[in-house]
Image: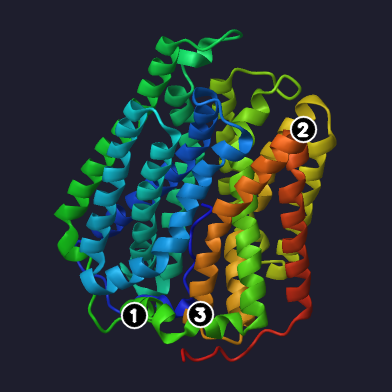
Amino acid sequence: MRTETPLPSSTAAAHPPHGGQRGAFASITTLFFAWGFITVTVDPLIAAMKSIFQLSYAEVMLTQFAFFMAYGVISLPAAALLKRLGYARSILTALGIMIAGCLWVPCATAIGTFAQVLVALFIIASGITILQVAANPLAAALGPPERSHFRLTLSQAFNSLGTAIAPYLASSVLLAGGIFTLHAGPITAAQRTTSLHHIDVAFLGVAALIALLALFIASVRGKLNLPQSTPQHDAVHAHASVAASGALREALRSRWAVLGAAAIFLYVGAEVSIGSAMAIFLHRPDVFDIPLEQAGKWVSLYWGGAMVGRFIGSGLLRRLRAPVLLAGTAAIAAALCLTVSHAPGALAGWAALAVGLFNSIMFPVIFTLTLERSSASNAATSGLLCMAIVGGAVLPVIVGQVADATGLRSAYLVPMLAYLCICAFGIGAIRSVRLVPARSER
């Protein structure tokens, strides 16, 4: 998924498995699925918000700004919270915050203002941020250390499954009936009320599922806290102290840490921008010319492509150097975006959907290439890279502004430029020297 955080190898588990860890790991895996599902539910919500509130592209892209800004604001406080509360209570706190955000959505629609919907999304994303900070190291820890990478990969596969099916299911509710039955003419108050009610139903349903998940987590909470001496706790403590210790300033003095952060910023921004506009783009008469609900369901192909590409990419990484594969996939993604901006009809739609396949390996490869080459400590470098996820808040707004000024097709040139920069990062990594041995955590 677009916000997964690969772990350095030093975070592998250090304690042996015991009875009940499988159940605990299963509960953590459901968390990966849940936040993947909720994150991508925002894509069909964007199409719904644009029509219901009659918004411009730049205005409706503020949904992603509100959602992904939480990563920049909450990431470091979340690590400090995890250090204070431990894994189980931090996860339950995160789920409680997510439920509160979902319950705020009906309040927002009752008030009838788009700004309140943005508040609800920021609350939900804040909970997801805390959840990610806790769940990534915990997934690696629950079992034998030699299988930690397998467990994290399996958990992230379920995250990808959530992102693949969410657009289909969410579009069936968010983009059905109400104003979306109109082919022409003004929107009536009754149709607008019906569409807002569908948004309430979707998020109340999500809140109910999260509540059930919280009960499940509470039932195994005793198995979710690790001994204080494990590397996971050391990693969390290091991450929590990044801001206080000035380690971010250390990362900013490292050329490769800065370049890697820029690449993560651009990658997340490009991926989110394309997914956000996908339903609206496929719905256009000059592309697929299909109902908006059906177009929203087709967004599942974009995220499903990323899931399939992850498996293909894992195999290719056994045969190709990581920076070579990154440069190649980024170049293809850029070419596809150029195709979207110029190709006629359905070809543009298929090109847009195909970008997902080539997005698949970018985040983890950029992350690990940066860690290998940064002259700063892993804690400082990782902190800067995680904060760079805020690109998912910034680039969609830029794409929206370009779409308002020159058209939605032309707006695909923005992610095209982002992918070209990522390609350049990959080429630079090919020519650079990996820092060996690994640096100590200073």
Q: Assess disc 1: are there few (<14), some (14-19) or many (≥20) residues with their C-alpha within 10 Å of its C-alpha.
A: some
Q: Helix, strand or loop at disc 2?
A: helix
Image location (x, y in percent) of residue 115:
43, 39
Q: Which amino acid type is shown beneath numbered disc 1?
A: His
Distance in Å between CA atoms under marks 1 and 3: 15 Å
Can residue 360 be seen in the rendering of this structure?
no
Which tag, 1 or 3, sits closer to the chain's start? 1
Write down the quadrant of residue 196 in the picture. top left
Image location (x, y in percent) of residue 391:
58, 57
Read off the residue under disc 1. Answer: 237
Image location (x, y in percent) of residue 217:
21, 53
Per the rendering, the mark at residue 348 is 2
Q: Which amino acid type is shown beneath numbered disc 2?
A: Ala
Read off the residue under disc 3. Answer: 248
What residue is rendered at 74% in x and 42% in y? Answer: 412
Q: Assess disc 2: are there few (<14), some (14-19) or many (≥20) residues with their C-alpha within 10 Å of its C-alpha.
A: many
Which tag, 1 or 2, sits closer to the chain's start? 1
Which tag, 3 or 2, sits closer to the chain's start? 3
Q: Helix, strand or loop at disc 1?
A: helix
